[in-house]
Image: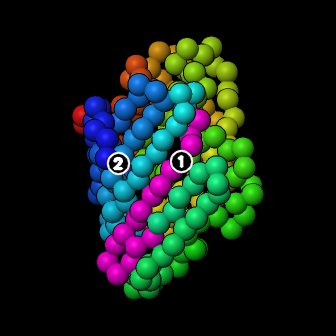
Amino acid sequence: MSVLPGSLFWERRDTTGAEHVLVDVRRGLHARGVALAVDPIPYTATYEIRTDAEWLTTVCEVRAAGEGWVRTVTISAAGVTAAEEGDLDAALTAAGHPSAGLPGAEEPELLVGVFDVDLTGSPLTNTLPIRRLGLLRAEPGVAHRVRVAWVLLPSLEVVLADQIYTMLDAGRVRFANETFSADLTVDADGFVLDYPGLCTRRL
């Protein structure tokens, strides 16, 4: 296992939780992270993401686990693979929540040609399109529409999602989808410092 030289830590605002990730940005991105949250049920998710030098995602591996269950999913050029041990649905229904879908993608062919992944609640994955599109040097006010492989936590369902990124001014990028928008504050490397309503970076 390689040693990664950078470290980022976010504290969640919308729920009790946090995310810590180790990163290397010398040749694209190599990231290994862990995200913890209590909603909808307590879970821990570990992930590893690699991109090429142009910040196109080449592989994303995620493992989510909680009391009585564990799920895994891998997204790569070879497709989407997933597995489950235990019973996440039993844990969700016992806590009064609806059951989840199966891990993985129901229609993986829709993800062909998708360059970015997005993990629910993870500010790290906002950096992928920001860097891939060169938004830190882009003309302010120009909207860029992207299609992402959205990995839902804790279920690890993978769905196709449309998102829009717009450079506002130095250090501020607007993230939006069909029902939501937020103005993100980012550092000189494109990593999120502040995500209104979601998280604040502490390291």
Above-or-below relation of 153 to 69: above
Magenta stretch?
56-71
Q: Secondary structure at mark 1?
A: strand
Residue under label 1: 59
Above-or-below relation of 44 to 192: below
Foreground pick, 116 / 28: 28
Considering every residue shown, the one lying at the far left of the view is: 203
Snapshot quadrant of residue 2: top left
Residue at the spot x=58%, y=74% of the render?
A: 101
Q: Secondary structure at mark 2?
A: strand
Residue at the spot x=39%, y=78% of the render?
A: 69
Foreground pick, 42 / 16: 42
Residue at the spot x=64%, y=36% of the render?
A: 164
Q: x, y (%) of residue 17?
A: 30, 55
Residue under label 2: 33
What's the CA distance linking mark 1 and mark 2? 14 Å
Q: x, y (%) of residue 16?
A: 29, 57
The amino acid sitting under disc 1 is Val
Above-or-below relation of 16 to 137: below
Considering every residue shown, the one lying at the far front of the view is: 1
Q: Does the magenta run of residues contain 49?
A: no
State the quadrant of the C terminus: top left
Q: x, y (%) of residue 57?
A: 56, 40
